[in-house]
Image (tube, helix red, strand yellow):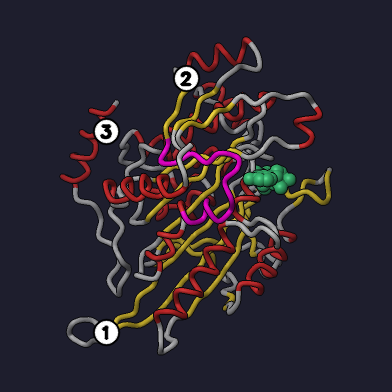
Amino acid sequence: PQDLETISENVATSRTVTSGSRILVFVRLRPMGKKEKEAGSRSCVRIVNCRDVYLTEFASENDYLRLKRLRGRHFTFDASFPDSTTQHEVYSTTTAELVEGVLQGKNGSVFCYGATGAGKTHTMLGTFENPGVMVLAIKDLFTQIRQRSCDGNHVVHLSYLEVYNETVRDLLSPGRPLILREDKQGIVASGLTQYQAYSTDEVMELLQQGNQNRTTEPTRANETSSRSHAILQVVVEYRVRDAAMNVVNKVGKLSLIDLAGSERALATDQRTLRSLEGANINRSLLALSSCINALVEGKKHIPYRNSKLTQLLKDSLGGACNTVMIANISPSNLSFGETQNTLHWADRAKEIRTKACVANEEALQFPVSDTDQAKLLLELQKEN
Ligand code: ADP
Ligand code: MG
């Protein structure tokens, strides 16, 4: 197997080649769980060279037929992490570079996608002993700010919010639902607590508490609802002098998102999709799928307004932002169908073209010109 250095080199190459013009997509396989072992499950996922993912067997004849329709039991991603990969390795490969960008006034977002139990919260939040991407990113951010600023002019604001059943809630200060409105920086939730944090322990404490405030399933009081999305936003503000010695305000925003479980919402065929929609499943996740489809197909109209989640993620998906998706999967053949769907969607997300990521200064982001868009479309068509 390749070591982490090779993966990092591969990913760095992907980043240079695409220069933020597409979403980087990673897969993380978690170890087989105790319950899965007890249920006698076998592993049906093989990762080769930290890049290629193979589905090696089928749970049932039905799965085989579905797989044939998807035309794939082999997928390639920017990197695929075997179950031995540490939290730190995942952080440094997927997110460290986005933290650098935020310190240069760029936006970045990372979202974890996958079925319930596939390892999203472990990857994003982790535990006190084994912190995940959210905590490692903030730790790294503080370290770097300490290293580079002698004048202490960086201000870091954190907010942590939840989208559940099309209601947006503040996880750091639970209360009434928040209302989304649009300002010149994009969509914001009015009244959201902006917490100033100074140390990593404080942040972990805060996020653990925030997670306790996540909506729980009515039937299982201690378990976070598989339909709740959690979004951590870290805003870094600082002032620099430009070439003409004018003071410029720079703002970088990092969004780290632990999405709701993707099971059920992931019907691959439109007809099933529509019937499921009627059955009150996660509207935000469906809307996310529709936006991904529209972006991949190069549609002019992207239906961001269809859900709270897509409104909040608008500038991360199609805007000027470095975006990373981590697809979490279980190795068990009992989760075969979910794994297959997750990989299918992750594969599709590779094709989303984003705008080149530029730093936010007083004047914000310029839109992609029509000719650029036409060129991108042609490229996409050629690839398909
Ligand atoms: P999700 O948030 O996707 O529903 P969790 O992150 O809660 O899933 O993971 C389900 C279970 O698997 C948890 O008990 C978690 O500790 C464990 N787990 C997930 N990923 C890993 C991993 N990479 N290594 C070890 N245990 C993991
Ligand atoms: Mg979770």
Q: Residue at x 64, y 64 (%)?
A: 170
The crowd level at tag 2 (other Cα within 10 Å; few <14, some 14-19, many 20+) is few
Q: Which residues are magenta?
A: 77-92
Left or right side of 145 for 163: right
Q: CA distance from mark 3 to mark 2?
A: 19 Å
Q: Residue at x 83, y 50 (%)?
A: 221
Residue 35 sits above or below residue 242 on the image? above
Tell me the amino acid under the disc marked 3.
Leu
What is the secondary structure assignment of the residue under circle 2?
helix
What is the secondary structure assignment of the residue under circle 1?
strand
Q: Residue at x 51, y 22 (%)?
A: 269
Tell me the amino acid under the disc marked 1.
Arg
The crowd level at tag 1 (other Cα within 10 Å; few <14, some 14-19, many 20+) is few
Residue 85 in magenta? yes
Residue 48 or residue 333, whichever sits in front: 48
Q: CA distance from mark 3 to mark 1?
A: 40 Å
Residue 185 or residue 322, whichever sits in front: 322
Residue 218 sits above or below residue 141 on the image? above
Is residue 258 visible in this depiction of the protein? yes
Q: Which mark is residue 241?
A: 1
What residue does disc 2 label?
Answer: 70
CB-based contact (under 8 Å), mark 3 and mark 1 = no
Question: Residue 253's image quarter?
Answer: bottom left
What residue does disc 3 label?
Answer: 380
Q: Residue at x 39, y 62 (%)?
A: 107
Left or right side of 127 for 382: left
Residue 105 or residue 29, whichever sits in front: 29
